[in-house]
Amino acid sequence: MKISHILNSKRTISFEFYPPRTPTGIKDVFDAINILKEYNPDFISITSGAGGTTRALTEELAVRAHTETDLNVVAHVTCGGQNRDDIDQILRRLENAGIENIVALRGDLPKGEDVFQAADGGFAHASGLIDYAKANFNFDIAGACYPESHVESSDIDSDIYYTKKKVESGADVLISQLFFDNTYFFEFVERARNKGVLVPIVAGLLPVLSASQIRRFTLLCGATIPKRLETLLTKYEKDDYAMREAGIEYASEQVDELLHNGVQGIHFYALNRNYSISRILDNLKL
């Protein structure tokens, strides 16, 4: 089912998984998918590694999840390291497999590189990929958005400009980067709406598993660590169990506030784990 149709009829809960580096890890991913499946997610997404490093496994996992479960599967497709023909073949295989939705992304910078380089004949921006996929296929397309602006954006106005360009190119839905202060998300949605971005905007959330994990992730994506969360990270710096429990409570409060303020969907970055997300959903009776 097309994700825009789902979002137009209800508020969504969804989960994101990533492919393992080797095929032997696929079973662990499916174990997490099958546990979280019990919460009746509206869709799940399968990511691709930086620079397309897990591209083949992304495609395999997406197709298998589509054929082996009754879930709506959204496959990530990235620009990095492939030209238009490569992308066309991936999109064609996904479409032939019955997948109806994709997330179209430029993709992260490959490790050790500071500037994104499009492949010869490829796309330099997500908007180009979105435009091509919308013109040549029948997918619903999700684009990424950034409550605190993309780390490569020069300023907020520039970030909103490129966000709107994705929608003008054909993005049906936007899914946000992770954030730990809901104010950033609410302010982003207001800016986007004021600029004419009217598609559904889904909030992306990452439950805290450990202090080191969150410090690493926020350094990469530019998300702010609020004072209250920083206090928790410092307190439980060396106690991952206690930090995970505190992270469940913190994320539960985040989700509760988002839902009470009319968010159109919650997209959990599961990291192929289920415990924290299960507890959050149980806490909120979702």
Image: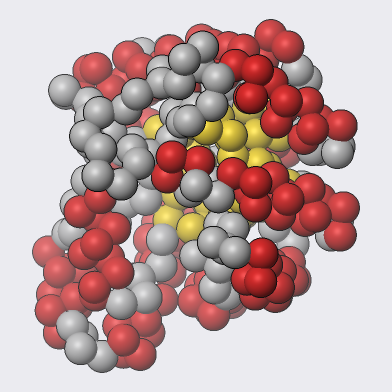
| Residue 64 placement (x, y as % from top left) | 80, 55
Residue 271's place in the image compared with 155, above or below, is: below
Residue drawn at x 47%, y 15% is: 120
Quarter of the figure that contains the C terminus: bottom right
Point out residue 190 in the picture as x, y percentages from the top left corner: 34, 28
Q: Does 167 sit above or below residue 16?
A: above
Up/down of 103 relative to 199, above or below? below
Q: Position of residue 203 (x, y in %)?
A: 46, 46
Q: Residue at x 43, y 12 (%)?
A: 165
In the image: residue 179, left or right of residue 130: left
Q: Quadrant of residue 219?
A: bottom left
Q: Nearer the viewer, residue 146 or 40?
A: 146
Label count reads 0
Q: How is the image coloured?
A: secondary structure
Picture residue at 54% right of the left edge, 80% below the top: 275
User: Residue 215 falls in which quadrant of the image?
Assistant: bottom left
Q: Is residue 134 left or right of residue 104?
A: right
Vertical arrangement, residue 166 with respect to residue 26, above or below = above
Question: In this view of the protein, can residue 43 be seen by the observer?
Answer: no
Residue 75 visible: yes
Q: Is 71 on the left-hand or right-hand side of 122?
A: right
Residue located at (54% from left, 61% from top): 21
121 and 241: which is toward the camera: 121
Q: Residue 210 versus residue 110: which sits nearer the camera? A: 110
- Quadrant where the N terminus lies? top right
Residue situated furthest front in the rendering? 120
Question: Where does residue 227 sit, x and y in percent of width and height?
Answer: 12, 64
Q: Relative to residue 257, is residue 142 drawn left or right?
A: right
